[in-house]
Amino acid sequence: MAANLLDGEDRKVSARIPGYALYIDPPLGRVGLSETQARKTGRPVLVSKRPMSRVGRAVEKDETKGFMKILVDASSRKIIGAAILGTGGDEAIHGILDMMNADVDYRTLQWAVPIHPTVSELIPTLLGDLKPANN
């Protein structure tokens, strides 16, 4: 990594939070653990899922296929994973990835006021509807 070579840092790829996008139709943005992976950790997990038909921007574009899902560690209140399958999911996932990298309580993002109409504007609502995952 350039930071290690040029800036004397000691960064490791293994310390990064895994995130990616698949450019399918509709696109998929993912970060962190899947729900299956999160459940296998044995820790208490909160989950919320909403259809893209609840996203004003998706409705406006007539592209309502897909969903948004977010996972939170119930004890630490940190976001541990998310997926956005739908229009703009490859872009909107970055806000969640940033919160995960900042290592902050999910409520920091829950109380944000996103711009309307965007795909990201449903994320606070999604976080407000967290429920225990059925382990």
Image (cartoon, helix red, strand yellow):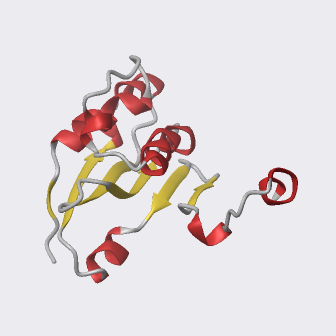
Residue 58 makes an appearance in the image: no
Of 53 and 79, the residue lying toward us:
79
Identify the residue shown where x is 68% and y is 62%: 11
How many numbered discs?
0
Q: Residue furthest front?
A: 8
Where is 4 relative to 63, above or below?
below
| 2 displayed left or right of 55 | right
Q: Residue furthest top?
A: 116
Location of residue 131 in the rendering, given as x and y in whole percent from the top left corner: 12, 56
Of 79 and 57, the residue lying toward us:
79
Q: Quadrant of the C terminus?
A: bottom left
Location of residue 30 in the rendering, given as x and y in whole percent from the top left corner: 50, 56
| 23 displayed left or right of 123 | right
Where is 131 relative to 57, above or below?
below
The image quarter containing residue 35 is: bottom left
Identify the residue shown where x is 52% and y is 42%: 94
Location of residue 61 in the rendering, given as x and y in whole percent from the top left corner: 47, 26
Q: Quadrant of the N terminus?
A: bottom right
The image quarter containing residue 78 is: bottom left
| 74 displayed left or right of 40 | left
Residue 39 makes an appearance in the image: yes
Identify the residue shown where x is 46% and y is 35%: 63
Location of residue 31 in the rendering, given as x and y in whole percent from the top left corner: 49, 57
Identify the residue shown where x is 64% and y is 52%: 23
